[in-house]
Amino acid sequence: MKKISFILVTAMMILLTACGGNDPKPAATNTNQSGGNETVSPTTEVAADYGDTGGLTLPLVDKPTTITWMLVSENPVQDKLIVKEIEKRTGIKVEFQTYSKATFQEKLRVTLGSGKLPDVFHGLTLAEVKKLGKQNAVVALNDYADQLPNFSKLYLEENSWVIQSYGDEHGKLYTWPIYNMNRDVNHGFLYRKDIFDKHGIPLWTNTEEFYQALKALKEHYPQSYPLASKTAANLFKDYAYGWGIGGESYPMYYDEANKVWKFAPMQQQNKDMLDFLKKLLNEGLLDPEFLTDTSDSWTSKMTTDKAFVTFDWIGRLDLFYNQISSKNPSYDLRYGNPVGPTGNIRTLFPINNELNIAVANNANKEVALKLLDYLSSPSGGTLMSMGIEGETFTMVDNKPVYPELKDVPLVDISVLDNKYGLWLEGATLRPDRRSVYYNFTEKEQEAQDMMLSAKSFEPLDPILNFTDEETAEILELQQGLQKAAEEFNSNYVLNPAYGEKNWEDWLQYAEKLGSSSLEATYNQAQQRYDAAAK
């Protein structure tokens, strides 16, 4: 779990995992709290069967109830199918207060300043939500665990570390996490398989073979720079996983062998990585513009004979082909093996808390909590990420097909959002893995299969829970250290004169900037984490 709780929330789409749901139809049983079946009298009006609710009985309320929910959406939501279906199933009418990503933070701050909190909202930092919790403005979720079977199962039983990582010093959790959102593989090394095959160059399986493949490409295309990049200084973070010093908390990482946090740019593994990149640059194998290339110029190189290997998002595999196929139908960009001694790539978190979804402590709190719990069930996850089976979609070969969208070239989550109000940010708490978001292309599926088969993932590190004082200290120290590290890494690779002396000077300079203090703060938080786990 390579993430730290003080990082400011990002307004990105948060995506999760779930099981399937069933067609709404008359049922002879209701799901009880233990997950079994409770016999219903034939004379009793029976509720519709909406699938696995995780122990909740629908509807959630015995009289019509309205709650407010403030979240990010680029489209109007209130007249969409999802609002009507939530009310139909749960008895709860949700008034979604939606704002675009560009304006959401401003609107949120104004709303909070008014003193009237929406019943459900997201967008604050974890520290800010904890502060509201201590002021009794938002609910401590685990105080209501006996009413929330899905929350209890997912975050108190199966993933008890959630309290350690996101709760306060008293073990109170004020933010509702998102369950199993990520794909297994989203980034990695990509290579021109058509060019490799044309010249009989095998796909590398280790760092030396990677180097030899680049050399072979240079021989066949002397005017090329086989390895290109567009991510500027982020390249060092992306490559760091292969050298065992990567993580979401970069430039800090957790050394699993020694059970201690370290500042990655000062480790011997970082120097080894820089020496490797320096060698590639000196031999004309790495594009000299690897730190300054724009997306457009990088694309031009990767779609011609100027570059053949890069590190990027797996969606690029098909995007580049679609862009160039009319001119070069044999173009074939594929996912390659990791580079570096560990042979590992980044591990993506199964549970995400970046949005910091909170529930206001008011008269609607229990209703709001039960709704969140339903949306965290397999049934609720299917509803929010796929829609209504038999009404909005049907299953064909275990994939959803949308009859109303049959003329849409590609049904993705943005299309479902626009049409039905699905995939709402901050309200999609447990997406169904059958959803279109997980419908990989042949090339993307190959990437998933390669890494899952090889089990080439860096171990997950603890998500540390910092005090306000520690958070302030980290922000102060880490900003300067990271900037200095990026400058040193760049100069070390680009400047032919840089060597051992410069490395030793860097170690001393990083120490002056407070690297030891930064490490001590992380390890102090780790000690608390370990103690709480016992």
Image (tube, grey):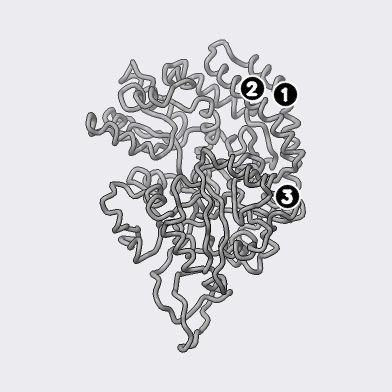
Q: Mark 2 belongs to which amino acid?
A: Ala
Q: Are marks 2 and 3 in contact (CB under 8 Å)?
A: no
Residue on which the image places disc 3: 530
In primary-sequence order, the first of circles 1 and 2 is: 2
User: Disc 3 marks which amino acid?
Assistant: Asp
Q: Quadrant of the C terminus?
A: bottom right
Q: CA distance from mark 3 to mark 1?
A: 28 Å
Residue 160, position in %: x, y? Answer: 65, 58
CA distance separating discs 2 and 3: 31 Å
- Residue 209 at x, y = what percent? 42, 30
SS at circle 1 = loop
Residue 438 in sight here:
no
* Residue 404 quadrant: bottom left
How crowded is the residue under tag 1: few (<14 C-alpha within 10 Å), some, or many (20+)?
some
Q: Residue at x 31, y 19 (%)?
A: 221
> Within 10 angstroms of label 3, few (less than 14), some, or many (20 or more) residues?
few
**Mark 2, other Cα within 10 Å: few <14 / some 14–19 / many ≥20:** some
Is label 1 in contact with label 2 (beta carbons under 8 Å)?
yes
